[in-house]
């Protein structure tokens, strides 16, 4: 990404390098609605946000055919506010959150699409299920208790490092857990198709390892200003 390039040019450049079967989530967190509109005019319809208040502010400012993916840690006390407003919650990082999403979705009369966030990266602060916890959840078929939630796949992040072998290794671990659930543990689980891996710095590695949904922010919109 070059700072002299426009949002439109950045999107076009990423899409030109991306296989057609991979979907691009433009991560617009900390960027204003005007920047999202620039991406929209370039044809982008899928956007990712990580904060509830920011998402709720942006939705009415922008076209209705935008699909929003929630990608941040979701506090259960804020959850109800976004039920029915997202195309997908990619960041389900605990069973408790999943159960609350299901309960609130049922109450609201909607079905919520979710991804299970898996944690393999080194950083201690990362949210998500460990591979063992995730496997245990599916082996015991607890997803069968869900009434208004559709588990569409898995989301994960690699360790934040310049060591590309390490990054590829993390993505392989996430991808192999996804594949194991899909092909061995719960092959009857319908629509379990989405493997969300890869951000600005590592999406090409992620795609090579099987990702079909990438979440790219700064390579499209530039650096985020966290003071906002
Ligand atoms: C912010 C964020 C991204 C985008 O990160 P960039 O490095 O700016 O592309 C992707 N995924 C998640 C979960 C994020 O929080």
Image (cartoon, rainbow, N blue to C red):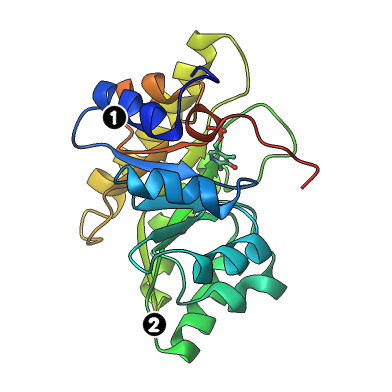
Q: Residue at x 61, y 45 (%)?
A: 31
Whether residue 117 can be seen here: no
Q: Residue at x 37, y 77 (%)?
A: 111
In the image, residue 81 above or below residue 196: below
In the image, taking residue 209 as reference, residue 47 lies left or right, namely: right
Residue at disc 2, secondary structure: loop
Q: Residue at x 33, y 65 (%)?
A: 65
Q: Count residues near mark 2 (Cα–Cα under 10 Å), then give few for <14, some for 14-19, many for 20+.
A: some
Q: Can you give x and y, in whole percent of width and height, for residue 188 in the image?
A: 20, 60
Q: Can you give x and y, in whole percent of width and height, for residue 22 in the image?
A: 26, 36
Residue matched to label 2: 110
- The foreground one among 58 and 23 is 58
Of tags 1 and 2, the one toward the viewer is: 1
Q: Residue at x 69, y 65 (%)?
A: 75
Q: CA distance from mark 1 to mark 2?
A: 32 Å
Whether residue 207 can be seen here: yes
Q: Can you give x and y, in whole percent of width and height, for residue 28 in the image?
A: 54, 46
Q: Can you give x and y, in whole percent of width and height, for residue 152 in the image?
A: 33, 57
Ligand 1 shows up in the quarter that is top right
Q: Which mark is residue 15?
A: 1
Q: Count residues near mark 1 (Cα–Cα under 10 Å), then give few for <14, some for 14-19, many for 20+.
A: some
In the image, taking residue 103 as reference, residue 53 lies left or right, namely: right
Is the CB atom of the residue marked by disc 2 within 8 angstroms of ligand 1's nearest atom? no
Q: Which mark is residue 126?
A: none
In the image, residue 33 above or below residue 21: below
Q: Earlier in the sequence, mark 1 or mark 2?
A: 1
**Can you tell which quarter of the image residue 96 is in?**
bottom right
In the image, residue 175 above or below residue 118: above
């Amino acid at each position: 990404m070059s700072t002299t390039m426009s949002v439109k040019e950045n999107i076009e450049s990423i899409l030109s390098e991306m296989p057609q079967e991979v979907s691009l989530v433009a991560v617009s967190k900390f960027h204003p609605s005007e920047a999202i509109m620039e991406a929209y005019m370039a044809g982008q319809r899928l956007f990712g946000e990580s904060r509830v208040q920011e998402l709720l502010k942006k939705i009415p400012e922008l076209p209705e055919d935008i699909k929003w993916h929630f990608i941040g840690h979701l506090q259960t006390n804020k959850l109800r506010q976004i039920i029915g407003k997202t195309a997908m919650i990619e960041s389900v990082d605990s069973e408790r959150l999943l159960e609350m999403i299901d309960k609130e979705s049922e109450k609201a009369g909607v079905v919520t699409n979710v991804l299970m966030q898996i944690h393999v990266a080194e950083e201690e602060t990362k949210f998500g299920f460990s591979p063992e916890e995730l496997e245990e959840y599916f082996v015991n078929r607890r997803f069968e208790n869900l009434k208004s939630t559709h588990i569409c796949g898995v989301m994960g992040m690699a360790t934040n490092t310049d060591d590309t072998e390490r990054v590829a290794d993390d993505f392989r671990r996430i991808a192999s857990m996804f594949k194991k659930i899909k092909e061995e543990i719960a092959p009857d689980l319908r629509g379990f198709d989405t493997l969300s891996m890869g951000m600005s710095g590592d999406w090409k590695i992620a795609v090579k390892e099987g990702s079909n949904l990438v979440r790219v922010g700064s390579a499209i919109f530039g650096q985020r200003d966290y003071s906002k």
